[in-house]
Image (cartoon, rainbow, N blue to C red):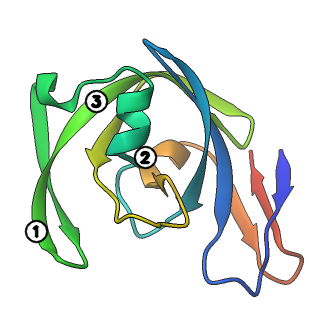
């Protein structure tokens, strides 16, 4: 699948559908090739019925404000760029109020696939 993006923008936004115990939601994630793991805003995960306090796994991440410990949750389903995963692990973190996005789509989402980011055409392809 190929989707367009603004090649002159500061961020590359990707629409993602998430499924949880309490329903589904469509989020705007930032494609982040510098992020090892996909990270979703805590508020979005709570709205989908996930409880970060019940997570048995936590990880350290480096953010702009320092090193933080965040829980890992298994999403029932995540779909982005026509690629869907079941029981996909994501990190849960509270993003600052007023954030332009709902999280980061990290390298773990693209593992084993060919990701092409064409800044001359403003197109992303995932094969």
Residue at 49% x, 52% y is 102
For mark 2, give the secondary structure: helix
- Labels 3 and 2 touching (C-beta < 8 A): no
**Where does the image place residue 11, in percent across and percent down from the top left?**
61, 75
Q: Mark on residue 67?
A: 1
Q: Quadrant of residue 9?
A: bottom right
Q: Earlier in the sequence, mark 3 or mark 2?
A: 3
What is the residue that sits farthest to the top in this orientation?
21
For mark 1, give the secondary structure: strand
Q: State whether residue 35 is above or below residue 26.
A: below
Residue at 13% x, 47% y is 59
For mark 2, what is the residue? 108
**Where does the image place residue 75, in percent across and percent down from the top left?**
41, 25
Q: State whether residue 2 is above or below residue 78.
A: below
Q: Quadrant of residue 54?
A: top left
In this view, the residue in front, 11 or 81, is: 11
Q: Residues within 10 Å of mark 3 (few under 14, many from 20)?
A: many
Quarter containing the N terminus: top right
Quarter containing the C terminus: top right
Q: Earlier in the sequence, mark 1 or mark 2?
A: 1
Q: Earlier in the sequence, mark 3 or mark 1?
A: 1
**Where does the image place residue 89, in percent across and percent down from the top left?**
34, 32
Which label lies toward us, 3 or 2? 3
What is the residue that sits farthest to the bottom in this orientation?
8
For mark 3, what is the residue? 73
**Where does the image place residue 122, in percent across and percent down from the top left?**
84, 74
């Amino acid at each position: 699948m190929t989707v367009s993006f603004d090649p002159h923008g500061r961020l590359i936004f990707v629409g993602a559908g998430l499924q949880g115990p309490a329903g589904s939601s469509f989020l705007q994630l930032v494609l982040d090739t510098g992020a090892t793991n996909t990270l979703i805003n805590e508020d979005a995960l709570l709205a989908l019925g996930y409880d970060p306090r019940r997570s048995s796994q936590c990880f350290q991440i480096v953010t702009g404000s320092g090193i933080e410990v965040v829980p890992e949750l298994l999403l029932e389903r995540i779909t982005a760029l026509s690629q869907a995963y079941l029981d996909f692990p994501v990190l849960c973190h509270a993003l600052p109020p007023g954030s332009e996005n709902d999280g980061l789509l990290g390298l773990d989402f693209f593992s084993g696939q060919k990701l092409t980011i064409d800044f001359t055409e403003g197109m992303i392809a995932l094969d």
